[in-house]
Image (spheres, grey):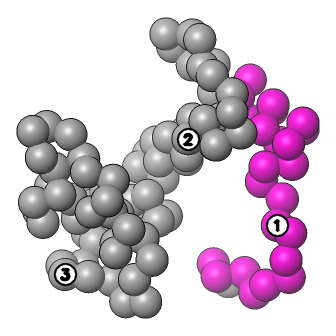
Amino acid sequence: MAGVAVNCHPSRSGQIKDGKPDPREFSPLIFAEEAPGAEVPLGGFEEDHLRFHFRLGMLAGLGNLGLERRQERPDFPAIERLLRDRFAYFEDDIPHEDPLR
């Protein structure tokens, strides 16, 4: 969900420069206590958008683990299995309340 919220703001707030996002500009959006600026449109949280950002997050997760993607078209089910089974990537490691309940 953070991906949806963060990606909703850059095009409106000037954080896209020369057609590329400037990662330094995203830190305040990611780590802010309160959401900056305009609200995120509810359409951004539709299932299609959430799945899209989930997949982007998995690709970023590969890079964070030092892995490289060599396929032009990623095999997302295989990437999800790898991250889940080998790296326990989707496991919570600290107790917390479910924010969706």
Q: Are marks 1 and 2 in contact (CB under 8 Å)?
A: no
Residue 28 image position (x, y, % from top left): 34, 75
What amino acid does circle 3 point to? Gly
Residue 99 image position (x, y, % from top left): 64, 82
Mark earlier in primary sequence (1, 2): 2
Lateral position of residue 65 relative to residue 35, left or right = right
Lateral position of residue 20 relative to residue 68, left or right = left
What amino acid does circle 1 point to? Asp
Number of the label disc, if any, that sits on residue 68: none
Q: Is the residue 64 above or below the residue 39 in the image?
A: above
Q: Secondary structure at mark 2?
A: helix
Residue at image mark 3 = 37
Number of the label disc, if any, that sits on residue 60: 2
Q: Is the residue 34 above or below the residue 61 in the image?
A: below
Residue at image mark 1 = 92
Mark earlier in primary sequence (3, 2): 3
Which residue is depicted at the point 19% across and 81% down? 37
Residue 6 image position (x, y, % from top left): 35, 63
Q: Is the residue 93 above or below the residue 78 in the image?
A: below
Residue depth check, mark 1 versus mark 2: number of the one nearer the observer: 2
**Residue 68 magenta-highlighted:** no
Q: Is the residue 4 above or below the residue 20 in the image?
A: below
Using a 10 Å C-alpha cutoff, classify the residue at mark 1 as few (fewer than 14 neighbours), some (14 to 19) or many (20 or more). Answer: few
Which residue is depicted at the point 74% across and 23% down? 78
Q: Note whether residue 75 is visible.
A: yes
How many circles with numbers are drawn on the protein? 3
Q: Note whether residue 51 is visible.
A: no
